[in-house]
Image (cartoon, helix red, strand yellow):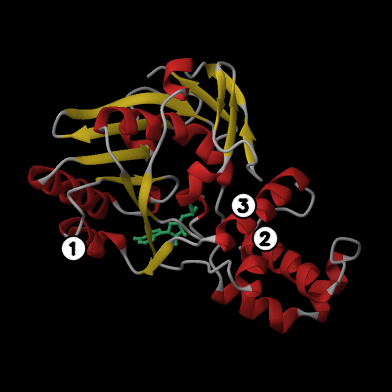
Amino acid sequence: MPIRILGGLHYLALSDGIDPWFAPHEVVAQHRDWLERFVAEHDVQTNEVQRCFALLPAFLELARAGGRRLDLLELGPSAGLNLLFDRYGYRYRNGIWGPADAAVVLAGEERGAVPGQLLAVEADIGRRQGVDLNPVDVTTDEGVRLLTSFVWADQWHRLERLRRAIAVLRADPPELIRGDYVELLPQLLADRDPDGLTVVFQTASTLYLDRERYDQVRTTLRDAARAAPLGWISMQRWDEEDEAGDGPPLEVALWPERDVRVVARMGPHGEWLDYFG
Ligand SMILES: C[S@@+](CC[C@H](N)C(=O)[O-])C[C@H]1O[C@@H](n2cnc3c(N)ncnc32)[C@H](O)[C@@H]1O
């Protein structure tokens, strides 16, 4: 609830030019009805592009092993900014990756270095699809305001990264489907194109499922992998971690030939990466 209220205050700052940070109690009192509605109607919505800093090596592993086009299917993409990972630039200790003129360049702390050979792999992306209960449409000004309102107003670097990533998305948006992926996943996987390698991925989304529904997702993935190869990249939930560590493990699978393997640990927002491959 406090996060929603702060998001609402930031939203007011972005839309009406009000400065809520100078006298927050007054602004809350003046806009009480509006804030009550905002808090009731909006879940906290964030789409953290920095997580691509941790995801890229996993995508490159699948591009290398799969040897063909990747068709992306993200579970819980929010605005879909991470479905555009290949349009961003990356700086790692052993090399760079991505378009030379990328508007978004991601870097972070590398506790275990990403190998240079992996950074030489190219990724050819076909379909970009995501399923979200509440997709945020950042091709509209309202969607931009909503997503921006949940990044704290003093986090300039995150706000600037978000602004740039939204501009990248607006040039060519991914396909966002409104719905519950636990229900929609079987059909989406049945419809996949056998010429590409479908890669299902998620960050900070399956942790919202109860265990039963999460198991349902895993069963759907394994069933679908019997029909045709399937890639999977996932930031693990707390109840999957084999041993306690400093950040969520990142797992990768390429079924049926390679079962799930933890390839890295990452900062929750992708601010650091310990890649061990
Ligand atoms: C914290 S956000 C993470 C967004 C994005 N994956 C990222 O890492 O920036 C979690 C997203 O998962 C979505 N979500 C949670 N459960 C879902 C479900 N069962 N079906 C579809 N979307 C879901 C939420 O609507 C929200 O947009």
Is tag 3's residue or tag 2's residue first in the polypeptide sequence? Answer: 2
SS assignment at label 1: helix
Give the side of residue 182 with respect to residue 194, left or right. right
Relative depth, front residue between 27 and 232: 232
Disc number placed over residue 5 in the picture, else none? none
The alpha-carbon separation of the residues under discs 1 and 3 comes to: 30 Å
**Residue underneath mark 1:** 187
SS assignment at label 2: helix
| Residue drawn where x is 67% and y is 68% of the image | 145
Where is residue 160? Give x, y as percent: 73, 49
The alpha-carbon separation of the residues under discs 3 and 2 comes to: 12 Å
Give the side of residue 183 with respect to residue 164, left or right. left
Viewer-side label of 1, 2: 1
Viewer-side label of 3, 2: 3
Residue reaching furthest to the left: 226
**Residue underneath mark 2:** 148
Is tag 1's residue or tag 2's residue first in the polypeptide sequence? Answer: 2
**Residue underneath mark 3:** 165
Measured along the vertical axis of the image, is residue 126 above or below residue 9? above
Relative depth, front residue between 45 and 230: 230
Instruction: Choose top left, top right, bottom left or bottom right for residue 39.
Output: bottom right
